Amino acid sequence: SSTTHNIWKDADTFPKQKTKEKKLPSKKINAPSPKKSAACVERAQTSTINDQLDFILPSLQEFQQQGSAGRIAFTISDYSYSKEMLDDAYAMARDVMHLKYFFLVAMDPATIHMACDAGYPVLGWAYNGNGGDKEGSDNDGGSKKNLYKSEQIVIDVAMSKWKTALLILRRQFPVFFFEMDVWFLRPPQPLFRDQMVDVLFSGHSDSPNAINIGIYSVLPTEQSIEFFQVAINLFEQRPNVHDQFIMAQILSWADAHNKTKLEYATSHWGKDDIWGVPPPPMPTFKAGFVTHENFPSWKIVSSERPVLSEQTIAVHILCGTPLTAPHGKMQVAKELGVWMGSNGYYDSSDAKYLWMDGHIHNAVSFTMHYPGRKWQYQYHDMDGLRWLVSCTLALANYTNRIWVMPKLVNDRGFNFLWMVLDMQSVEEHVETRETTFPSNPRAWKSSKRYDSVSRIAISGDGEKSVQLYRQRDAWSPRLFEHTGSEGWDLDFVSIEDAMNRWFTLAESLQSSRVLLAGMPAVRGLFDKMRQINEKYSGNVHLDLSIPTEHIIHIYRSLKWCVQNHGENDLQEKVPSRATAGDDCYGRGDSPF
């Protein structure tokens, strides 16, 4: 067993598992008293939708002072988004979109509590039979007898954004709605300041004329009110029909040349008879048909693989299957650089980071590490990648640093680590940042962001010893040079002692804002770790040092979306083809 150095004065309390904690509190726009927060929760959980809107909305006279670009704006969210994006949504609405009237429709109790505790305007959707869910039908008392509980989330998403919009329109307010997977880069008001049609929808980047109901601007006309009412009625009769297709069906009737022979479409996405046999009765349009257009597809970019331009106002990150992959969508937004990043995500003065170090900036070469004598151990070595990630995660955990995900460089280019590593299994150990974080201008807001950078490295493919390096003030183009390289400290240590000393070096550089950690060509070290893990698996009592035990624990807790060598899983997943659906979050398997 390896020996624990005496500098580990707190070795007995070294965490075997560290829960990720949010480093900074929410920036509450109007931090309420406990009494006001409790009243907010009660109102959101017990009042009807109409009563909640009466509390949230301004008077029509006050609202009209905004002019033609004024909108009552809202989004909807459940905990899968709000746990990371609640503050971002309100900050984006306030600071980027310049919205005066904005609120969130909370789809679950957790989101209600979070919003109320932060002092945000929130409307609680009717869940678990709460009374407000029936409002918006023809008689404001529609039935849910046709709705299947197994599909309740699909139903609630459609009904919440349609019925909330309908009730606002009935009050003669114009509406602007966007989903939580939409990120705005600049104010949207120029898009609808001179709106001439009843409804403006988003399109799709690859099909600009096909509507996307994740974003819409609606004027309070008789036609638009009836449009939403008909959509709600049809959905209540056919809750298994995709909500976007229902609205597209109504718009196809509005665009038909001969409106005396309107018919239902028979197929959608390859499915026949989607309306059932017989279809619902043909609705009547007493107010006439709605007029509609789509936003320019280069200004509202809606795509699984969005491509932005200097004219882009917002990006809507889609997934092949609706209502899936919220973490993947957020990850794509971060990699694109459109993530809002409130609460010090980009500009914390206290945050410290750990980046992977090497000849390629913040990257791991998955094609070939420094091969040494037995290069086959390093070529497409999936297990070597697991050990490399485990060691740096343990180091970030111990030094209380944010772990910046490295690029994976292979034969075809480079990949995002979150495509193969289940980041849900990482969350319990460290706070993380996206792959593109170091090159994102938002991360360089402060002139002192990376004012102190140090480097440590452990290298060598020997079976008995490795070399350790330390470099303070590491803004140097020369990497891993121990002869004639100013600022480097070099030490040769045994394999057994390596991780203790590596962690010690990291601790000695605790004042540095960024710690660059490199592990090139450490086949011998990883072989030693594999041997320890095999004994650990066999429940053999091992007298391990604290760092080694912690690395083993993290190694065994991580989950992955690749098996065996994994190179075939990575070859086609280059960044230009990355989608939210490629995210490994919550889908990984343990190798054990």
Image (cartoon, rainbow, N blue to C red):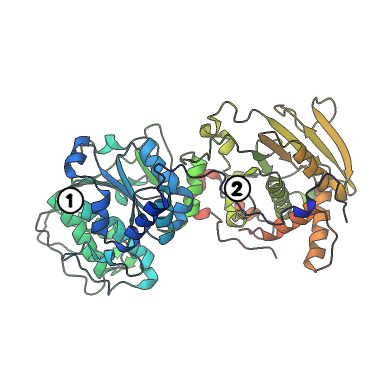
Q: Position of residue 297 (x, y in %)?
A: 33, 41
Identified at 89% across, 40% down, the residue is: 492
Residue placed under numbered mark 2 in the picture: 431
Q: Tell me: residue 328, above or below residue 192.
A: below
Q: Tell me: residue 109, above or below residue 517.
A: below
Instruction: Using residue 126 as the reference point, say whether residue 278 is left or right of it.
Output: left
Identified at 51% across, 45% down, the residue is: 25
Q: Tell me: residue 480, above or below residue 367.
A: above
The front one of 129 and 248 is 129
**Disc 2 crowd, CA 10 A, few/some/many (<14, 14-19, 20+):** many
**Disc 1 crowd, CA 10 A, few/some/many (<14, 14-19, 20+):** some
Identified at 82% across, 50% down, the residue is: 525
Of callouts 2 and 1, the N-terminal one: 1
Classify mark 2: helix, strand or loop.
loop
Residue 171: which numbered mark, if any? 1
The front one of 394 and 287 is 394
The answer to whether one can see residue 319 in this image is no
Which amino acid, by three-letter code, is at mark 1? Arg
Classify mark 1: helix, strand or loop.
loop
Which amino acid, by three-letter code, is at mark 2? Glu
**Distance between the Cα atoms at labels 2 and 1?**
45 Å
